Amino acid sequence: MSTLSDLLAEHTKLSGGEVDHLQMVVAEWQLLSDLSFADLLMWVPVGEGPSLDEYLCVAQARATTAPTAHPEDVVGTRVGVDEHPQLRRAIIEGRVCREEDPSWYLGVPVRRETIPVTYDDRVIAVLSRETDLAVPRVPSSLEIAYLGIAADLCQMIADGSFPTTEPSPDVHTSPRVGDGLIRLDPTGAVVFASPNAQSAYHRMGHPAELVGVRLAPLTRGLIADPFDATEIAQRILAALDGQPSMRAEAESGRGAAVLFRALPLRPGGKAAGALVLVRDVTEVRRRDRALMSKDATIREIHHRVKNNLQTVAALLRLQSRRTASAEARTALGESVRRVAAIAAVHEALSTSVDERVDLNSLVDKVIPVVGDVAVAENHVRVRRTGQFGVVAAEVATPLVMVLTELVQNAVEHAYPPGASGEVIVSAERSARWLDVSVTDDGRGLPRGFSLERSNGLGLQIVRTLVDSELRGSLSLRRRERGGTEAQLRVPLSHRR
């Protein structure tokens, strides 16, 4: 399905500013839909010349507070003026228009109301507010308050005063209608507070009813931090003065965390108070802090494991220097390299926030060192091509171990003493597989070589890790133009 911007670009000649305004309307209209207990459809006139005979639906919203009047997707649908005459009427008259008789849609009575979307004193689109009348509703104080605020916001859309560009918010979430709603009169006193809004203020430390209380000074007295208290109060007062405010979060003296948003209500340019949305996010923030603490603990564990492994590697290195046997020194040197490779993975995990590792940077750090220290008398260069991408921690450790062993094996056994060459580690990644090859231009595999019957410790480690940890496959073959190629395939999904 095409996006709003795609449909506007294809079917209209709206300017960039007009398109941005419609994008802002769509970003805000879930609030209006929930307050209206109705679906919202956005229509733009299409056709040649100034004709207003045909309209295209470019966006759709469904209320979370009521059953939908349009269970199917209406975006992309065209209607003529005969089917929906209020669309043309809203554009020509520039005002909110309502049908006197309900329309029938798929056997359901639907009340339609059209709201012109005005930008820079010109109607650029029409919102159709469509309510399912088959569901009986008992007028309550909450419903009356919701519909009254929705009427004010609809008039502000027709006036071109809503929505407006707001500064970037300090938080990336916003309270919803069902989280808690408060309506203020022009003096800043509460005339309606939903039960959830009342509960949020109870948790902040205000035990009495909110109706009749001036909200800004009350809120200032409940918030623990004096700077946050002043900022929230100023944002509420700014909304009363007609200025939109950013979303903000504050914590009360009792430890309750509440998210605020204040919107001015000025239908027809006349001050009608403000809408304040509140959401109690205390439990959400408690879980966030618990997760942050857990993540920090896990990263600290990885950091300590890395330090311990480096200590083990240093001890092995000291033991190697004190050993007279060349064979023992070689074995200890290989152990140092293996421990260092595991330590490098834990070092990467100590800075990760989601137990995932960027293999590109890790391989670039570990693999060249293997080539440098493997055989000092040879001049073998090791380089990487392709992208490994980001993998989970349980894949990173065995995969880095396998790669270091394969590179070590190629550098040590593919070239005679004093020779030079190049070992290439290539990666190709798809949604399902990570395919890695380690190729060299050396003398190739000996005749009769079998990976399964090889007794070398390095290849035994590789086979064990590929089978049991990576659940992948490995093959070694002689290249046609000389040298050896190791091919490794690791599944990236459906891991057990």
Image (cartoon, grey):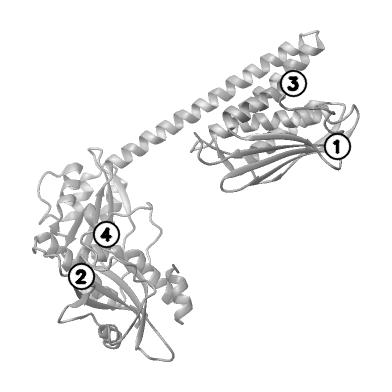
Give SS at disc 2.
strand
Nearer the observer, 161 or 61? 61
Query: Which circle, 4 or 2, is nearer the viewer?
Result: 2
Residue type for callout 1 = Gly
The disc, 4 or 2, on the residue closer to the chain's N-terminal end is: 2
The disc, 2 or 3, on the residue closer to the chain's N-terminal end is: 2
Query: Which circle, 4 or 3, is nearer the viewer?
Result: 3
Q: Which corner quadrant of the image does residue 45 belong to? A: bottom left
Structural distance between the alpha carbons of marks 4 and 2:
26 Å
The disc, 1 or 2, on the residue closer to the chain's N-terminal end is: 2
Dot 3, how many residues are within 10 Å of its Cα: few (below 14), some (14-19), or many (20+)? few
**Residue 4 pos. (x, y %):** 42, 70
Q: Check whether the beta carbons of the residues at disc 1 and disc 2 lie within 8 A of each other.
A: no
Residue type for callout 2 = Thr
Is residue 348 visible in the rendered image? The answer is no
Is residue 237 visible in the rendered image? The answer is yes
Residue type for callout 3 = Gly
Q: Which mark is residue 262?
A: 4
Q: Which mark is residue 456?
A: 3
Q: Which mark is residue 131?
A: 2
Q: Check whether the beta carbons of the residues at disc 4 and disc 2 lie within 8 A of each other.
A: no
